[in-house]
Image (cartoon, rainbow, N blue to C red):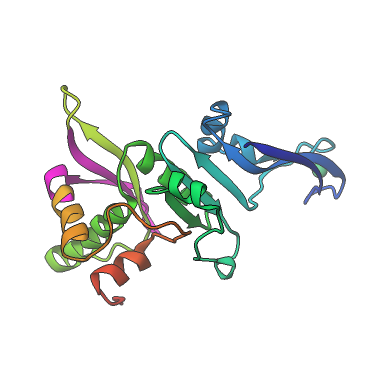
Amino acid sequence: MTKSREIEVTCPRCQKQSSYEIWDSINVTVSPELREKVLTDELFAFRCKSCGQEANLFYPFIYHDMDHRFWIQVVINPEDDFEHAPNLPPFASQMMKGYHSRLVSHLNEVKEKILIFEDGLDDRAVEIVKLLLRKNMMETENRVLDGPLRFYDLAKDKQGHPTSLVLGYFPVNGEEEIFAADWEYCLDIQEQLYMDLGVPEHEPLGWMRVDENYARQVTGTGKEN
Ligand SMILES: [Zn+2]
């Protein structure tokens, strides 16, 4: 279901009120036109009707893609986490089997998850690839990647077979960089995740945060300074 409502927002510049549409629930299977608007931030753009001030508003919502079998719950405070299984009747639990249910706290994370799941990837493996890239850069080049790494794309050859996982790196200072991880290597990591680390390929029902902390926990890697 897609659900939105009008609220009044006070302009941070002129203090006048403008109406603004917020989305509690975005189902892109029902409303496919909203997908692009999430990816471009258009859905979150506020424009004051009095002075023209523009801002992006961020608020809790659920993004649901039934075709790619994932939903993302956006929570503002990490303390709002509720990593429990939603209380669903048995038939619904059965339908939701193997769904990815994610908690995130930033729009960038929402967008990244959308791209990962649309490409049919497992974000748990992607987070481990990122963590190992950080470790590897430290060990081989003595270089600390201090900013976020984000999934960009799954590169493919002419036949449509994946060749590499492309990641964007956003340093605290400096220019964005692109890293690519070989696809075979990523598959190895995914297999290790399911086989050696005991992470179920089809995850159990329940909201879960999958980020660098998750990767550290699963791999037993402590926080590095
Ligand atoms: Zn204004």
Locate residue 30 relative to residue 208 in the image: left or right. right
Is 158 rendered above or below residue 75? above
Going by the image, does 71 lie left or right of 182? right
* Residue 18 position by quadrant: top right
Residue 143's image quarter?
Answer: bottom left
Looking at this view, name the residue that lies furthest to the top. 158
Q: Position of residue 65 (x, y in %)?
A: 48, 38
Q: Where is residue 148 drawn, in percent x and y?
A: 38, 57
Extreme residue toward the right, this view: 16
What residue is rendered at 37% in x and 52% in y? 170
Q: Quadrant of ligand 1?
A: top right
Q: Position of residue 101 (x, y in %)?
A: 45, 52
* Residue 85 vertical position relative to residue 225 in the rendered view, above or below: above
Residues rendered magenta in the picture: 162-186
Closer to the camera in the image, 95 or 34: 95
Answer left or right for 66 relative to 140: right
Which one is in front, 147 or 42?
A: 42
Q: Residue at x 53, y 33 (%)?
A: 28
